[in-house]
């Protein structure tokens, strides 16, 4: 009961304070790479636009007040309490967001759309492409309740043609396939492999939880990191997109753990933090609560 009461107070405080955070911002990684990442991010063709992962730099007052509030409510006591229940390792599973946390685009989306599209007659500037992309992405997707169904082609065809004014099928296929290669993406944290190995060696199970189409698994293979994880929960396969708690519950089911025994790490307050907490998991905001996977491991109780 004490555990649940503490978690409830923490959640209420975080919900109140995080509402003050800005919606727009440039995403950032632990290795200093910065880029634009969309709040409603998912798998695809240059996910760019908005993120909350740079809140620490943008809103020091908000972040400072949140940490002060957490100290008042005794986060350290809460972590100590978990250790009294589980031992030194506070969680049995780590859930990791993909885009913006595990991986990021290597080049700006508009630059790639423009570069590949030139030979197909795309004439819009990168700024125009980005603005049109944002407008298209913000529109309700009426073809289904999910953006990413199976391979996501219908949705991304709509986005590409809306962003560039080009409906050439060869252009779309070249662009679509590009974003399944290791040229299009790179790891956010260069120490990720070492950390995940240490976590799994210590008995902590690890899974990816992502709003993505079915290209995520081939992408993880291309980046040579699929074997780092015990499970992958993809919205296109689960048929639920974050912040729907279903996708987090599915990840816990795949790992064989209870939601309260898992912590999720992601860079989006709404999709990752609020969604995971609705499922009953702990959640830490990438770029604010934690800045590297080594820090994640240390908070879990695993030394790397």
Image (cartoon, rainbow, N blue to C red):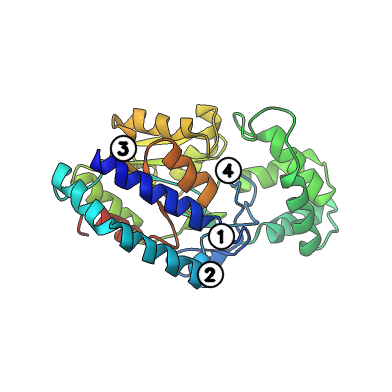
Which of discs 4 and 1 lies nearer the camera? The answer is 1
Q: Quadrant of residue 251?
A: top left
- Disc 2, disc 1: CB below 8 Å? yes
Q: Earlier in the sequence, mark 2 or mark 3?
A: 2
Task: State the residue in front, 178 or 105.
Answer: 105
Q: CA distance from mark 2 to mark 1?
A: 9 Å
- Disc 4, disc 2: CB below 8 Å? no
Task: Describe residue 247's horizontal placement relative to residue 228 as left or right.
Answer: right
Q: Secondary structure at mark 3?
A: helix
Task: Give the number of the disc on residue 56.
Answer: none
Q: Quadrant of the image for the C terminus?
A: bottom left
Residue at 55% in and 67% down: 34
Which of discs 2 and 1 lies nearer the camera? The answer is 1
Question: 10 Å neighbourhood of mark 2: few (<14), some, or many (≥20)?
Answer: few
Which of discs 4 and 2 lies nearer the camera? The answer is 2
Task: Give the number of the disc on residue 43.
Answer: 4
- Disc 4, disc 1: CB below 8 Å? no
Q: CA distance from mark 3 to mark 4?
A: 27 Å
Q: Is residue 102 visible?
A: no
Q: Quadrant of residue 77?
A: bottom left
Residue at 81% in and 46% down: 162
From the image, tell me which residue sits under label 1: 20
Residue at 52% in and 65% down: 55
From the image, tell me which residue sits under label 2: 59
Which of discs 1 and 3 lies nearer the camera? The answer is 1
Q: Secondary structure at mark 4?
A: loop
Q: Secondary structure at mark 1?
A: loop
From the image, tell me which residue sits under label 3: 260
Task: Describe residue 13's horizontal placement relative to residue 161 as left or right.
Answer: left
């Amino acid at each position: 009961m004490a555990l649940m009461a503490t978690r409830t107070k923490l959640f209420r405080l975080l919900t109140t304070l995080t509402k003050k955070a800005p919606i727009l911002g440039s995403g950032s990684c632990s290795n200093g790479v910065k880029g634009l990442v969309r709040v409603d991010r998912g798998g695809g063709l240059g996910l760019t636009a908005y993120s909350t992962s740079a809140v620490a730099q943008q809103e020091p007052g908000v972040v400072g007040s949140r940490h002060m509030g957490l100290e008042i409510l005794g986060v350290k006591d809460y972590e100590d309490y978990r250790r009294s229940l589980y031992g030194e390792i506070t969680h049995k599973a780590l859930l990791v967001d993909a885009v913006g946390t595990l991986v990021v685009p290597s080049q700006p989306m508009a630059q790639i759309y423009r570069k590949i599209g030139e030979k197909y007659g795309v004439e819009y500037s990168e700024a125009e492409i980005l603005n049109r992309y944002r407008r298209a992405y913000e529109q309700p997707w009426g073809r289904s309740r999910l953006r990413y169904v199976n391979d996501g082609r219908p949705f991304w065809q709509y986005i590409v043609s809306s962003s560039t004014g080009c409906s050439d099928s060869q252009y779309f296929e070249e662009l679509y396939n590009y974003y399944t290669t290791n040229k299009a993406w790179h790891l956010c944290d260069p120490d990720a492999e070492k950390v995940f190995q240490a976590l799994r060696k210590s008995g902590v199970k690890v899974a990816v939880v992502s709003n993505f189409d079915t290209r995520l698994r081939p992408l993880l293979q291309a980046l040579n990191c699929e074997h780092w994880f015990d499970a992958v929960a993809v919205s296109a396969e689960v048929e639920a997109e974050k912040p729907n708690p279903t996708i987090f519950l599915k990840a816990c089911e795949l790992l064989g753990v209870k939601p309260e025994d898992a912590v999720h790490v992601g860079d989006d307050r709404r999709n990752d933090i609020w969604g995971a907490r609705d499922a009953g998991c702990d959640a830490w905001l990438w770029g604010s609560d934690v800045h590297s996977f080594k820090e994640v491991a240390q908070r879990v109780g695993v030394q790397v």
